Amino acid sequence: MSHVNIFSGRASRYLAEKIAQSYGTNLGEVIVNTFSDGEFQPSFEETIRGNDVYIVQSTFAPAENTLELLLMIDAARRASANRIVAMIPYFGFARQDRKDKPRVSIGAKLITNLLVASGVDRIITMDLHSDQIQGFVDLPVDHMYASSIFVPHLKNLDLPNLTIATPDTGGTKRAAAYANFLNSDLVICFKQRSKANVVDSMTIIGDVEGKDVVLVDDIIDTAGTICKAAEIMMEKGASSVRAVCTHPIFSGKAYKRIEESALKEVIVSDTLPTKDHEKITVLSTADLFADVVSRVHNNQSISTHFEFKTLL
């Protein structure tokens, strides 16, 4: 059986080191040569001929993170790797999964096309913004769910009047699964936007009075929606409001908004790097990713371990 090498792009090294340690190996050595004009060239500093190469890199902004991943995949292919697996904890551009107005790109499809063109053999990712992105590429996609780390944490909180909520109607299916597993009520927030990252109005559907509310979402970007939802719920008599989010983008004034918000705690995974913050609790995904590396390498099933319906 071929040997496993785990490498990382510069943006996700903090997570890749934990994945490699959990798997029981050392993170492979990569150097990135940068030219004076900003052009860069990744280089594997050890032989990978005939090996299974796993490259960890979340494709969040800036776009150089995506380009670096593509260059590393191309380098691995040209170095005669046996199999190249892109481990993308946070799959960027996933919000561009369709034409929601005329004359716009479908960014998620473009990114998958680029991954295929670069020579990748398999993709491992977590909590895609849209599940259908798995069908954008004719390659195996292992879609993992952070629910397996969030649910035990929520259980340990032992909240007396737990109620699961979704900050928008698009996340109803995800929140309903949490509510069903945790045997709690479900509350839905209906929001209206005039443009991206700006919430004009929000309505709460359901009763939150006296409840310990947990808002469940896959992404927190500017934190405007989640903080507004928490504020309204507290105004309507909620005992406490927390948020659970897989991908903490936290752009713009996100940290300041969270600090000044009614949120008691924001529970996130480490698919993206975050700053230390007293309201933010980070749960690691490293053991999950290390386990899926082992299962893929040994041709073992991962369906029962990572299927959302099984976990919840």
Image (cartoon, rainbow, N blue to C red):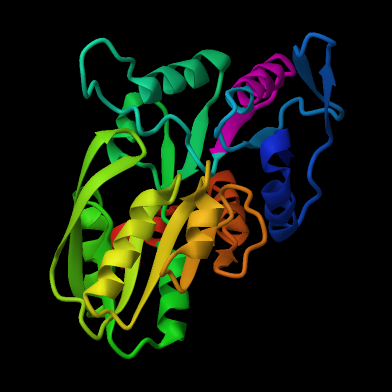
Residue 231, x across and y down, in percent: 33, 66
Please state, as top left, top right, bottom left or bottom right, where the N terminus lies in the image.
top right
Q: Is residue 274 above or below residue 124?
A: below
Q: How many marks are shown on the rendered structure?
A: 0
- Which residue shows up at 34% across the image and 71% down it? 214
Residue 71 visible to the viewer: yes
Which quadrant of the figure has residue 5?
A: top right
Q: Is residue 68 above or below residue 274?
A: above
Farthest-out residue, bottom:
160
Which quadrant of the figure has residue 228?
A: bottom left
83 drawn magenta:
yes
Please state, as top left, top right, bottom left or bottom right, where the C terminus lies in the image.
bottom left
Residue toward you, 189 or 65: 189
Q: Is residue 49 above or below residue 113?
A: below
Residue 32, x across and y down, in percent: 81, 24
In this picture, which residue range is highlighted in magenta? Answer: 67-87
Residue 244, x across and y down, in percent: 42, 63
Residue toward you, 283 or 294: 283
- 272 relative to 100 in the view: left or right: right
Which quadrant of the figure has residue 66?
A: top right
Q: Is residue 61 above or below residue 234?
A: above
Residue 137 visible to the viewer: no
Residue 232, x across and y down, in percent: 26, 66
- Which residue shows up at 63% across the image and 23% down it? 64
- Which residue shows up at 39% across the image and 21% down it? 107
- Which residue shows up at 51% across the image and 13% down it? 117
- 185 relative to 276 in the view: left or right: left
220 drawn magenta:
no
